[in-house]
Image (cartoon, rainbow, N blue to C red):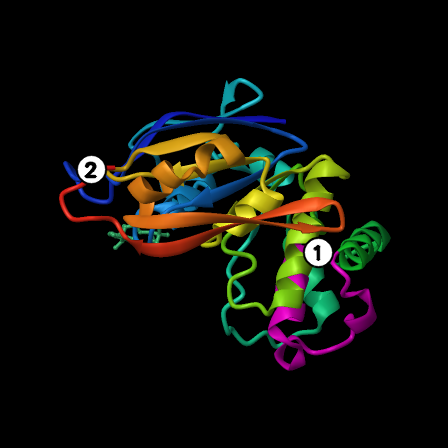
């Protein structure tokens, strides 16, 4: 899959653009992170991408052809794409397995009973997300990490080529963060999915995302290889803070951290 945003723009109110000229080109096998300060439009970008909101101009192209998930032909998009919402604290009056089977919705008729093929796909997805062992548990009784993994399994049950995730590791402890990030890498690099996720953590982008879209001020964004995008200068422009870069070696791998060190001096631009 080749996913492009071409000069995509969006505003909630006429004359007050929120997103302007957003462009990116992403391919199967890549993990993409979206970073930017609170209220800059990250969730809105995902909503537009999924067709919950309409672009004001420009928009989405899949494999070179215009795609509109909100149109009558949107079912085609949803056969290829899946969305993982923020886990939050909703109550789910169903088991893990039932929840994951909901991900087969695009394949079931209205009130259709899941067949053998659906159960197999759900089992494969639960195994991938590490929740097969708790398939019979009630979603109201599992931990936040297990719930997040269940929501990922639900998305994977539809066997998507494109996985869009809204802050998948927010609110999780260290161990669960590593599990979610490891799964993102595996899905992109071993299963050839295109994975796009919003995150507040530059370390997670540096560790997991091949490419990053970073929102700057005024509705504009930069995109490219994560290391090239998440520079001190760009972080300063995006978040209004000075960052210090720290590196550590772990099992032959270099871990990079960007530590927020202080506020950008008043009067400085970008
Ligand atoms: P982020 O995810 O980066 O924190 P959002 O995309 O949620 O940002 O919001 C971007 C901006 O759009 C915010 O200023 C927010 O108040 C505004 N906004 C979000 N949803 C709506 C809406 N339904 N109507 C009008 N403004 C909205």
- Residue 130 seen anywhere in this rendered image of the structure: yes
Q: From what the image shows, is residue 244 above or below residue 93?
A: above
* Numbered circle sitting on residue 40: none
Kindly report the secondary structure that dominates the magenta region of the rendered protein. Answer: helix
> How far from the left and from the top, in percent, is residue 64?
53, 17
Disc nearest the viewer among 2 and 1: 2
Q: Which region is colored magenta?
A: 129-155
Residue sitting nearer the eye, 234 or 21: 234
> Is 146 one of the magenta-colored residues?
yes
Residue 6 locus on image (x, y percent)? 41, 23
The N terminus - image quarter: top right
Q: Is residue 52 above or below residue 192?
A: below
Q: Can residue 225 be seen here?
A: no
Which residue is drawn at the image coordinates 50% and 69% (left, top)?
Answer: 88
Name the side, left or right, on which 145 lies relative to 23. right
Instruction: Find the distance from the CA under tag 2 to the CA under tag 1.
Output: 57 Å
Q: Secondary structure at mark 1?
A: loop
Q: Is residue 186 left or right of residue 260?
A: right
- Given residues 76 and 151, the one toward you in this image is 151
Q: Residues within 10 Å of mark 1 (few under 14, many from 20)?
A: few
Task: Specify whether tag 2 is near ligand 1 (CB below 8 Å).
Answer: no
Q: Give the labeled residue for mark 1.
A: 112
Q: Residue at x 82, y 53 (%)?
A: 124
Q: Circle 2 is placed at which residue position?
A: 269
Q: Position of residue 38 (x, y in %)?
A: 33, 54
Q: Nearer the viewer, residue 21 or 123?
A: 21
Drawn side of residue 234 relative to residue 2, left or right: left
Name the residue nearer the viewer: 249 or 98. 249
Quarter residue 19 falls in: top left
Label 2: how many Cα within 10 Å (few below 14, some 14–19, many 20+): few
Circle 2 sits in a helix, a strand or a loop, which is it?
loop
């Amino acid at each position: 899959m080749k996913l492009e945003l071409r000069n995509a723009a969006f505003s909630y109110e006429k004359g007050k653009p929120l997103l302007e000229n957003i462009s990116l080109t992403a391919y199967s096998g890549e993990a993409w992170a979206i970073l930017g300060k609170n209220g800059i439009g990250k969730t809105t970008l995902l909503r537009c991408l999924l067709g919950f909101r309409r672009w004001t101009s420009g928009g989405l192209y899949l494999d070179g052809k215009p795609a509109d998930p909100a149109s009558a032909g949107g079912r085609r998009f949803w056969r290829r794409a899946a969305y993982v919402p923020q886990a939050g604290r909703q109550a789910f009056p169903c088991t893990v397995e039932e929840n994951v089977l909901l991900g087969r919705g695009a394949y079931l008729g209205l009130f259709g009973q899941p067949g053998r093929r659906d159960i197999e796909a759900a089992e494969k997805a639960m195994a991938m997300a590490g929740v097969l062992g708790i398939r019979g548990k009630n979603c109201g009784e599992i931990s936040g990490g297990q719930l997040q993994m269940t929501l990922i399994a639900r998305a994977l049950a539809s066997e998507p080529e494109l996985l869009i995730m809204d802050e998948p590791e927010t609110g999780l402890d260290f161990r669960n963060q590593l599990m979610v990030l490891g799964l993102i890498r595996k899905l992109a690099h071993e299963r050839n999915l295109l994975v796009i996720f919003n995150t507040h953590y530059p370390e997670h982008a540096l560790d997991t995302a091949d490419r990053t879209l970073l929102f700057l001020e005024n509705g504009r964004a930069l995109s490219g290889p994560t290391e090239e995008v998440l520079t001190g200068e760009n972080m300063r422009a995006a978040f209004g803070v000075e960052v210090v870069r720290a590196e550590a070696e772990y099992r032959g791998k270099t871990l990079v951290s960007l530590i927020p060190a202080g506020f950008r001096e008043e009067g400085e631009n970008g």
